[in-house]
Image (cartoon, grey):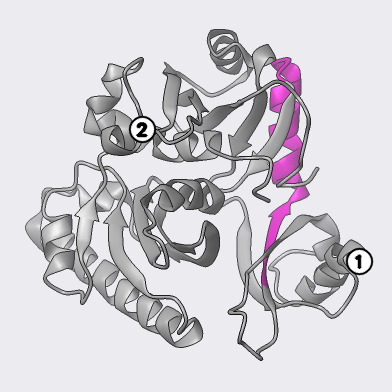
Amino acid sequence: MRFFKRTRKKEGWLSIAVQRDGVAATSVERVAQARPLVRFAHFHPGQPGVDVLEKAARDGQAGAYRCATLLGGGEYQVMNVEAPNVPREEMKTAVRWRLKDLLDFPVAEATIDVLDIPLDRNARSQQSIFAIAARNSVIGPRQKLFLDAKVDLSVIDIPEMAQRNISALLEAEGRGVALLSFGDDGGLLTVSFNGELYLSRRFDVTLEQLLDLDHERKHQCLERVTLELQRSLDHFERQYSFISVAKLALGPSAVCGLEEYLSSNLYMPVETLDLASLFDIGRTPELADKALQQRFFLPLGAALRTEEAA
């Protein structure tokens, strides 16, 4: 199964995210010249097995939408590699061969997809791509879970693409946006420009660590995050000098002091997102709650996918 499989079904996407303590399901309707409308956002607590998934699918009317799910941060790898000089139809085979020495497991046991990184029109450098690899032992059980729950799964997506979809809503014309979010599996930094993903970095600092009440431990985590951000953004600026990053946006969370700390240590504006300013939550007023915004941040991004976006 492809990560970015294109399908034809009814209008709209249902995003079903298997989380540590339950299943989050949401659907978004894109509205011309207006904020995307959140049709619903339901969380079903419990061990995320077939029973809970079936309930989420029923409540979300899974039969009416194309369905997507998300892998967790530790369930796949994203690598920036030089694009093989082969025809498009041979790209995955060539990338698979190139990844055989980069993966920590046999490439024959991997599901692989690729994502283009657009170049500056004046660039003379070699085209790069993102190569995404996940163990078949991760993909297979996820497919079986949805099959057993009688959910027609169209796409297995990754958090980078969901975060890119939200980042694209923040972009000013001609400027890129950096977006940093935290969850149970650590931090994720992305940079998007013209609706395309250009940077993906994982930080080994979890949301739980940032919520630590011990001042010294939390301060150490903030220092690590700041150092990783500075290194990543400096490297990005050198690699993609044609992209000017307008700001760093922080995903919704209840972390006190994060925005203030980063603002005082970075050279660009920093702001914390309020999803109520990006989405029309008239049907889902509960999403005004910051804890729920953090839970549905990536599922909402996954539900924003379009047929045109690979």
Q: Nearer the viewer, residue 166 or 180?
A: 166
Location of residue 241 by image quarter: bottom left
User: In percent of the image, x 85 and y 67: which residue is there?
Assistant: 91
Residue ID for mark 1: 90
| Furthest residue toward front | 33
> Is 266 located above or below residue 160 in the figure?
below
| Residue span colored magenta | 129-151
Q: Position of residue 262 (x, y in %)?
A: 18, 66
Q: Position of residue 9 (x, y in %)?
A: 75, 24
- CA distance separating discs 1 and 2: 39 Å
Q: Determine whether label 1 and label 2 are within 8 Å by CB.
A: no
Q: Residues within 10 Å of mark 2 (few under 14, many from 20)?
A: many
> Is 195 located above or below residue 150 in the figure?
below
User: In percent of the image, x 56 and y 27: which residue is there?
Assistant: 16
User: In percent of the image, x 39 and y 76: which residue is there?
Assistant: 232
Residue ID for mark 2: 279
